[in-house]
Image (spheres, helix red, strand yellow):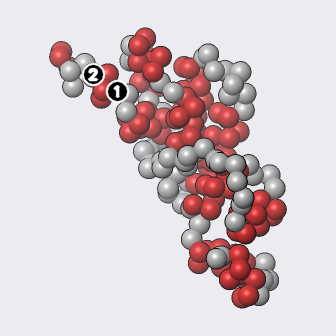
Amino acid sequence: MGIGGKCTLMSKLNIKEEMRAIDTKDRPWFDSLTDEEKKKLSPWLLMRYTSNCNDKMFTEHYLEWTNEVVNVHFNKLRKHTQLQFQLLQLVGLGKSVFHAWIAPGKAGKKNKLQAWVAENYNMLNDDEIDIILSNTTKDEWKQKFLEYGMDDKKIKELLK
């Protein structure tokens, strides 16, 4: 806390506090920012964090809702930071959860598992595939492949 009980710039604009305001739908938080703080807020960065949730119960919710509610027309709304922040708050579920950073994708060759996911879940973009891959264990993939009727040789090849 700063002088007079007001939060300082450092304490308000950090990813933990920003994500808390999104997750808990803290509506007054954005209005409590100064004009300078509002200019420094990065909805794009927050969208990257929001889309990835380490709580397996909510992974799909955060990914799908961020994509459907926030990512749609994101560039058209780039000058409306408060609206973008409010859209991010729509994704929140009322409690804080951990959101890991997802680095932007790099152009490059996909491994066999990525290629299989891209082929079988063609409605997902590369970032969504990366989220699914990072939140699914090898044992979970093996179980899924067995359910698909794959033999052990094919499974082993995909999971290399």
Rendered image quadrant of residue 137: bottom right
Image location of residue 121, percent across then percent down: 78, 59
The amino acid marked with disc number 2 is Thr
Taking the view exactly as shown, the residue that stands out farthest to the front is 108
The amino acid marked with disc number 1 is Lys
x 52%, y 35%: residue: 46
Viewer-side residue, 44 vs 18:
44
Label 2: element kind: loop
Viewer-side residue, 47 vs 94:
47
The residue that label 2 is drawn on is 8
Image location of residue 130, percent across then percent down: 63, 55
Image location of residue 157, percent across then percent down: 71, 80
Residue 26 located left or right of residue 114:
left
Res. 151 mark: none
x 63%, y 40%: residue: 66
x 75%, y 83%: residue: 154
Residue 25 located left or right of residue 11:
right
The residue that label 1 is drawn on is 12
Residue 107 lies, with reference to residue 70, above or below; the image says below
Q: Residues within 10 Å of mark 2 (few under 14, many from 20)?
A: few
Rendered image quadrant of residue 116: bottom right
x 70%, y 65%: residue: 111
Q: Given contact means CB atoms under 8 Å apart, are the residues at marks 1 and 2 in contact? A: yes
Label 1: element kind: helix
Q: Residues within 10 Å of mark 1 (few under 14, many from 20)?
A: some
Image location of residue 85, percent across then percent down: 54, 26
